[in-house]
């Protein structure tokens, strides 16, 4: 996993704590729109570095908005934590932008980045493991 | 920027890139079967505010579509989570334009 992708996954962990009701795909879709994505074709034009930059900026703004000095990452669900770990460890992702990998997986499962459920994504990324 | 909540007509909200065609039909039917016209206890939708005050949904496409479809004119609470004053959201379709 490249450095930008590793850092992006770490920021997604913190964003997950700020948006507990949002699926991981929704979070990535939100960050992608912050990079300027307007159509599904645009996902290919973004990079992990751009996604990271926007995610970090938004994390900072949203933390201020919520008046949080410390991000409550300990509040993350076990499923989200497993999913973020799977993003770091899975052999099923390419070396391309993370968002493109997840868009591809969503498409293969006949859904979208916005709609894909965390448990479905986790099963896809960790097919060998028992997922509660 | 402090937290800001608004009451808006969900039909006027813009759809996000991967939901440009509107709410997922299966999810929408599931929500309608489960909640019908109920809006009590519905958490605020999350939106970003772009140029000219246009609002794009980042969380709540199915909820917005359900209310727009079943309760025309009913306003919903949204939370503005980001300001993007230079971003033109009029390129994104509205919930109303993609209502099933």
Image (cartoon, rainbow, N blue to C red):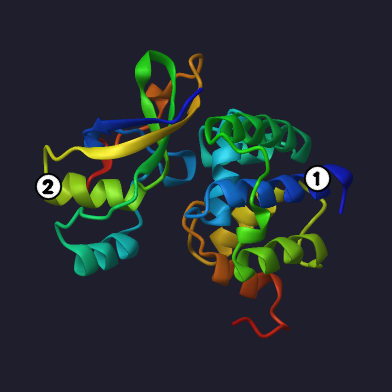
Work out how far the residue at label 1 is from the one at label 2, CA to CA, in angstroms.
43 Å
Chain letter for mark 2, please. Answer: B
Residue in the picture at 58% in, 55% down = A24
Q: Write down the quadrant of residue A79 in the picture.
A: bottom right
Q: Position of residue B90 (x, y in %)?
A: 37, 23
Query: Residue at the location (29% across, 53% down)?
Result: B42
Residue sitting at 67 percent across and 85 percent down? A130
For label 2, the residue is B71
Give me the residue at 86% from left, 54% from top. A1
Residue B96 in which image quadrant: top left
Looking at this view, is A5 or A63 the one in front?
A63
Q: Position of residue A125 (x, y in %)?
A: 69, 70
In the foreground, B42 or A23: B42
In this rendering, position of residue A24 left or right of residue B68 = right
- Determine contact: label 1, label 2, CB under 8 Å: no
Give percent across and percent down for residue B65. Answer: 26, 48
Q: Which mark is residue A7?
A: 1
- Label tally: 2
Location of the C terminus of chain A by quadrant is bottom right
């Amino acid at each position: 996993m490249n450095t930008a992708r590793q850092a992006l996954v770490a920021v997604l962990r913190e964003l997950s704590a700020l948006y507990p009701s949002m699926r991981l795909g929704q979070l990535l879709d939100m960050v992608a729109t912050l990079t300027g994505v307007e159509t599904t074709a645009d996902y290919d034009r973004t990079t992990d570095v751009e996604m990271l930059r926007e995610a970090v900026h938004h994390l900072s703004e949203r933390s201020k908005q919520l008046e949080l000095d410390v991000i409550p990452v300990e509040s993350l669900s076990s499923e989200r934590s497993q999913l973020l770990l799977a993003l770091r460890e899975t052999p099923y992702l390419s070396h391309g932008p993370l968002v493109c990998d997840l868009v591809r997986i969503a498409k293969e499962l006949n859904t979208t980045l916005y709609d894909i459920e965390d448990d479905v994504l986790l099963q896809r990324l960790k097919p060998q493991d028992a997922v509660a | 920027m402090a937290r800001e909540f608004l009451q808006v007509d969900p039909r006027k909200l813009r759809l996000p890139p991967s939901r440009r065609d509107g709410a997922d039909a299966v999810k929408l039917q599931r929500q309608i079967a489960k909640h019908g016209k109920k809006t009590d206890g519905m958490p605020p939708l999350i939106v970003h505010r772009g140029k000219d005050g246009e609002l794009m949904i980042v969380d709540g496409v199915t909820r917005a579509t359900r209310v727009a479809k079943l309760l025309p004119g009913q306003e919903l609470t949204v939370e503005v989570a980001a300001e993007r004053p230079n971003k033109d959201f009029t390129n994104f379709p509205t919930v109303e334009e993609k209502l099933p």
